[in-house]
Image (spheres, coloured by chain):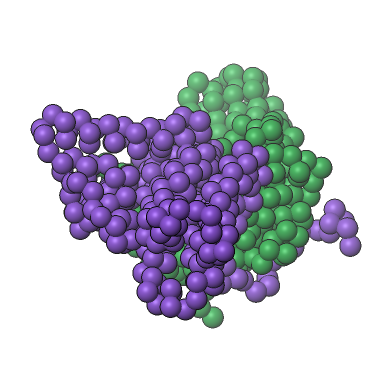
Amino acid sequence: MAVYKRAYRRYDGPLTGRWTRFMVLPRYAWRRLYQQRLVLLLTMAAFVWPLLCAGFVYLTNHVELLQGLDPEFRAFIQVNGRFFSIFMYVQGACAVFLAALAGPGLVAPDLANNALPLYFSRPLTRWSYALARLTVIVGMLSVVTWVPGLLLFGLQVGLAGGWWFLANWTLGVAVVAGFLLWLLVLGLVAMASSAYVKWRVVAGAVSLAFFFILTGVSQMINGVFRVTWGYVLDPAWAVNRVWRALLGLDPLDGPGALSSIVALAVFVLLLVLVIERKLRPVEVVR
Amino acid sequence: MPTTPVVELENLKVKLGRREILHGITCRLGVSGTGKAVGLLGPNGAGKSTLILALLGFHRPSAGRARILGMDCRRSMGEARSRIGYMPENDSFVGEMTAVTFLRQMAELSGLPPKAALEKAHEVLFHVGLGESRYRELRTYSYGMKQMAKLAQAIVHGPELVVLDEPTNGLDPAARRRMLKLVADMKEEQGMNVIVCSHLLRDIEQVCDEAVIMKDGAIVHQCNLEEERRSNRSFVELEVTGDDRNLLTALPEIGAEGVAEGGGRWRIVLPPGVEVEAIWGLAARQNLLVRKLTHRRDTLEEIFLKAMGHLAHTPGEDSPVDAGRT
């Protein structure tokens, strides 16, 4: 029967489970995000570097194609921690821009249109709402970060053989864990800026500026006080430090990996508090 | 057979900051599954919206307990919310979504499978009169349409209880009539319990079976409008010129009773079956010149004014109602 001929009747069928309900917000948000051409274009552009890296992995595993090259150079181009660190820097930077572009659309429209009471009057807690929104950004950025990273790792294992996997399996773990840490920071920064600034463009600019300003502040502190601990105030530097430790590369000058992890944990906690204060169904005016 | 009240409050206190908004409310409202409507009445700032928000778990009670459909508002709020629909007072929507997508998302969040959610979204949009504009983005809707969309999202998942906060706010007369008809349909046709929060007496009188009057964060009166309607008493506001000293003793002749308010002004309660023409006849027999006569069957206004302390005594009552706070 045509829908306009049907009279409204209360739904009395079966209900979906908790996880299905949790994934409703991410599903709708992803659909909306990928309807934006700029997001789609930037996501596609973010695949260029992984494709080049895949070509590099292929070349390094086909010695016959590198016959004409200098032996020293051939020894230099290897799939190791340095290779994955370069891959991660580029994809990490792409993730920053994607987060700045897509992040503001997460919470800002709900706050601007006062939609939170509608969400929270349903079986959805504030925490599950925040987690669902974080899932949107982490899921979206995963497509251009740890997923291609893991595919590259898999490609290398496939081409180099099991011995390479046994010797370098920590690189795969480092790529996934390192990127997830970065995505958590990016997602929370994007959500916090989106929760406090209702205009999308401004919110995007705020989340970008956030990293640049903190980098500047940390450099300033290091310069003025002639110290290196100022780097812990720069989340990008701290994440980079953790990545290097995970990939087994030489450490940077400055605080150690543990200090960086603690600094990032404090940073994440502060962002969670900032978001928690804003995501309320009703605002009490004092 | 035991009955579960729609709302059960035990000494409920709610504080916003340091200020106590609800001062220990105790009451039982409605019976679950009966398809009745309860009206929350009160002037602005009486605590109606705070009470609703506390029932929805948006405000944590500072003391006491609130149960909704038999479930504790603190412990079982998740389960309770899947059985509740809420229409907030202010604009609430996701602007960049079409009405269908918005309603589908809301239905899925309440636990409907995607296919059923889509069907219900279409169904309910036709039901509230937005069928033709269901593919338009919500931000392009007029205020009246947004109100209807808010109502649609409140009922799309077929809740047992629908909480409506000022549903007719800002609506033109035709839209207001339509909204009230929809609310009446919800309880009569769909068997939903409804809580309507409003400061408009006529709206409450028209659709509710029970009314609760709030003032300064407390319930000052609770009445069964069905019984009031059944009594079918009608009220007359009369203003006469002449010697009206015998009018009070003459009123029982037609079975009526009333109170003099001075200056020739009277408030009279007519019993069922007695028409207003009887007043004209009585005035003529008493040689009184009628300057003004207003006749209405609106009992709620009398009750409301009494509860607010604007009227010393509700005409027709044998004894003043104890308006003490509960």
Which chain does purple denote in the image? A
Q: Residue at x 37, y 63 (%)?
A: A174
Q: Nearer the viewer, residue B26 or A50?
A: A50
Whether residue A172 is visible to the viewer of this picture, yes or no, is yes
Whether residue B154 is visible to the viewer of this picture, yes or no, is no
Where does residue A97 sit, x and y in percent of width and height?
48, 40
User: Which image quarter is the C terminus of chain B in?
Assistant: bottom left
Left or right for B292, reference A94: right
Which chain does green denote in the image? B
Left or right for A174, reference A118: left
Residue most toward the bottom?
A: B1
Q: Nearer the viewer, residue B290 or A119?
A: A119
Where does residue A257 sit, x and y in percent of width and height?
22, 56
Where does residue B259 sit, x and y in percent of width and height?
50, 35
How many numbered discs?
0
Q: Quadrant of residue A54?
A: bottom right
Q: Residue at x 29, y 45 (%)?
A: A237
Where does residue B183 sit, x and y in percent of width and height?
67, 50
Left or right for B1, reference B283: left
User: Which image quarter is the N terminus of chain B in?
Assistant: bottom right
Q: Where is B113 relative to A202, above or below? A: below
Q: Residue at x 38, y 32 (%)?
A: A209
Q: Residue at x 76, y 44 (%)?
A: B134
Q: Nearer the viewer, residue B41 or B297?
A: B41
Left or right for B103, reference A169: right
